[in-house]
Amino acid sequence: MPLWKVYHPVGAFTAEDKKALARRVTEVYAMVPIPKFYVVFIYEEIAKDSCFVGGEPHNKFVRFKVDHIARTLPGQVLREWWIRTLDAVIAPYVKDRGYDWEISVDETPFDLWSLQGEIPPPFESVAEKRWVKENRASPYTLAEKIPVNLILAPGVADR
């Protein structure tokens, strides 16, 4: 799951802003594709004079802390592309409103995660495709762990 924790000044975002931002970011992840229900947002208001940057109070600062578990980003080029993509998505809510902001992404091991007691199925598996379609976690079989586009090596199929 990508878990987004958004630390922001009191009143920085309306309820509608929060919903719209969460939806915009969710759509970016859906293009990967991963199930939309993997994307979780938690907004936390920070009281005036409770955020400090460089040792000084900063009341126009928004901090985005993102935990990635469902996917990791291999290589510097993809990592930079991803951060720039996210910066563009959040810009209307921070940059365009005069806020300073920071975003960071931590990558947590996939095998230390479950949803409703289910270990998430492998990437591009039959089960994951079903989870994307149903937008919820559900039990799956060993056979559903197989990739949707399984290509067997030459000679294996003719035995």
Image: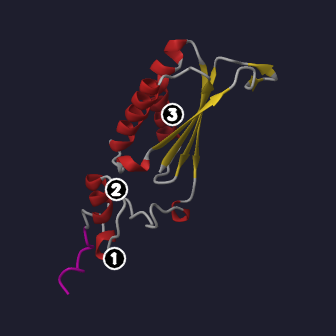
Q: Residue at x 47, y 36 (%)?
A: 82
Give the left or right position of residue 145, taking residue 116 as reference: left
Q: Secondary structure at mark 1?
A: loop
From where the camera sits, is residue 73 visible? no
Quickly name the residue at label 1.
142
State the separation of the CA atoms marked 3 and 1.
Answer: 35 Å
Q: Which segment is the magenta one?
A: 151-159
Q: Secondary structure at mark 2?
A: loop
CB of mark 2 within 8 Å of CB of mark 3?
Answer: no
Q: Secondary structure at mark 3?
A: helix
Q: Residue at x 29, y 70 (%)?
A: 144
Quickly name the residue at label 3.
83
Determine if the magenta segment contains residue 24.
no
Q: Quick one: label 3 or label 1, which is nearer the N terminus?
A: 3
Residue 153 x %, y %: 27, 73
Seen from the viewer's position, the closer of residues 50 and 68 is 50
